[in-house]
Image (tube, rainbow, N blue to C red):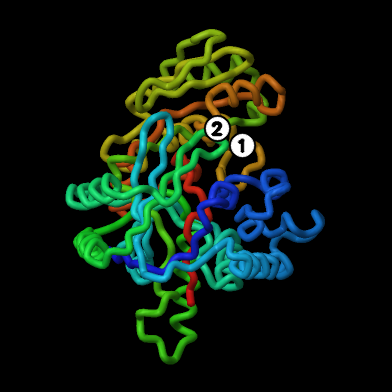
Amino acid sequence: MAILKAFKGFRPPVDIVKELASRPYDVLDSDEARVEASGNKYSLLHIIKPEIDLPEEVDHYSEEVYNKAKENFDLFRKNGWLVQDEKESLYIYAQTMNGKTQYGIVGCAGVEDYLNNVIKKHELTRPDKEEDRMKHVRVTNANMEPVFFSYPANQEIDLIVAEFVGKNKAVYDFTADDGFGHHFWVISDKTIIDKLTSLFAQLPSTYVADGHHRTAAAALVGNEKKNNNPNHKGDEEYNFFLAVHFPDNQLTIIDYNRVVKDLNGMNAEELLKKLEKSFEVVKKGKEIYKPTSLHNFSMYLEGEWYSLTAKKHTYNDNDPIGVLDVTILTSEVLDPLLDIKDLRRSKRIDFVGGIRGLGELKRRVDSGEMKVAFALYPVSMKQLIDIADSGNIMPPKTTWFEPKLRSGLVVHSLD
C-alpha cells in the first residue's frame, strides 16, 4: 500500500506566488540562480540556492550556506511570504505545456514506503548529492521542494480530481516566464482527503519520476529523526515528505541527448566506418534529423546529420535494460569506440535535455566545444515502470521530464 498523507502546508500569498515560485535547485547552477533571483526578494532560490546571498567565493557546501537557507526560511515565514494552512490538506497541482495539462496530487509520501521499496526507483544516487540535500533538510527542518512521483493511473482518482477541479477555482493560476502554466487547488474537505488516501492505500507502488536525490535525502533524514527519538510513535511529520503524484498516463518523457568532446583519436571517416558494424548508417544532410522510433538515433558530425538504426544483435528485447537506446549507445559507441567508460564521471561527455531542442546539439558541435552529438528517441513510462518493478536501474541520464515542478507553491515542515 502507498501512503498519501494530508499536511498543513506553508504557502505564499496569491499576490507574490509567481515571483516566489522557482525552478528546482538542480536545474540551474549558482550563477544562473543569482541572475534569476536578482531584484526578486521573494524568490525561493534564496532558500534552496542560498549561496546566491553570500560572496561568490564561499564554498557551496559549507555550513554557512546551509545556515543561510534556514535564516532565509525563517525570514520568509516572519514576513508572511510563506504562511501555514490552518487545516491539514491535500493539494492538486496542474501544469500546462504545449496545450497539454497534467494533474498531480500533492501530499506527503511515507519514509517507510521508501525504505521498504513501495516507492520504486530507477536511478542510482550519488552520496555527495544525497548528503547535500540531507544537510539542507536537517538545517531547515523542512522539505522545501516536492519530489516528482508517478503512480499507475486510477479511474476513481481521476474522477475525484476532475470533479474537484471542475467545481473549484484554482487558488494559484499563472504562466511562468518559460511559457508553462501552473495551476493549484487546496483540498481541505476531510471526506475527499480520506477517499484519496484510501485509494492510494490500494496502489501497490508509486515511482520516483524525477528527484531521486531529494527523495533519498528526505527519507534518510526522516529515518534519522526516528532513530534519534526515544519517544517515536510513527505519526510525527518527519515520517513523511513532500511529493507530487501524477498518473503515469499523463506524463511525457522527452529525449536526453549526448555530446562528446572528441573522437578518441579517430577522424570522422573512421568513426563512420566503425559505426556500420552496429548500425545502418544513412547520411541525412544539413537539415536537423530527429530520431523516428526506438533504436533509431541521430548523429551530428562535421556539419552533417546521420540516421543510425541499431542492428538486431545490438539489443535484447527480453532485457529491460539491454533494450534501452541509452544502453545500445553506450555499449556500441561510447564505450568501445569513444572510450567513455563512466558516464557519471567522464569529463569528455555532456548531456543535453531534449527541451533545448536538437538545435542545441548542433550549436555545441558547430562552436567547436564538442565534436559529435547523438540524439535518442525518448524512453516510455512503461519502460521506466518495467525497470523499476524488476528492481533494475536505468543508466545515467536516461529520462528527462518536462515541465519541471515549480518549487515554493507549498512547503512541508517536519515539525
Q: Which residue is mark 1?
A: 349
Q: Is 31 situated above or below 305?
A: below
Residue 1 visible from this viewpoint: no
Inspect the image, locate mark 2, and give the three-letter code of the amino acid beneath it.
Arg
Q: Quadrant of residue 368?
A: top right
Say whether disc 2 or disc 1 marks the residue closer to the N-terminus. 2
Inspect the image, locate mark 1, and give the three-letter code of the amino acid beneath it.
Ile
Horizontal side of residue 334 vs 29, given as left or right: left
**Contact check, label 2 and label 1, Cβ < 8 Å:** yes
Of residues 37 and 42, the one drawn nearer to the viewer in this rendering: 42
* Separation of residues labelled 2 and 1 (CA atoms): 7 Å
Horizontal side of residue 162 vs 36, given as left or right: left
Residue at the location (52% across, 53% down)?
Answer: 407
Of the 4 image quadrants, the one containing the N terminus is bottom left
Residue at the location (44% across, 24% down)?
Answer: 297
Q: Is 116 situated above or below 46?
A: below
Q: Position of residue 140 (x, y in %)?
A: 59, 70
Q: Is 304 situated above or below 41?
A: above
Q: Position of residue 60 (x, y in %)?
A: 71, 59
Residue at the location (44% across, 41% down)?
Answer: 401
Residue 384 visible from this viewpoint: yes
Q: Position of residue 190 (x, y in %)?
A: 26, 67
| Marker count (numbered) | 2
Label 2: how many Cα within 10 Å (few below 14, some 14–19, many 20+): many
Of residues 74 and 48, the one drawn nearer to the viewer in this rendering: 74
* SS assignment at label 2: strand
* SS assignment at label 1: strand
Label 1: how many Cα within 10 Å (few below 14, some 14–19, many 20+): many
Horizontal side of residue 113 vs 352, given as left or right: left
Residue at the location (70% across, 66% down)?
Answer: 68
Q: Which residue is mark 2?
A: 258
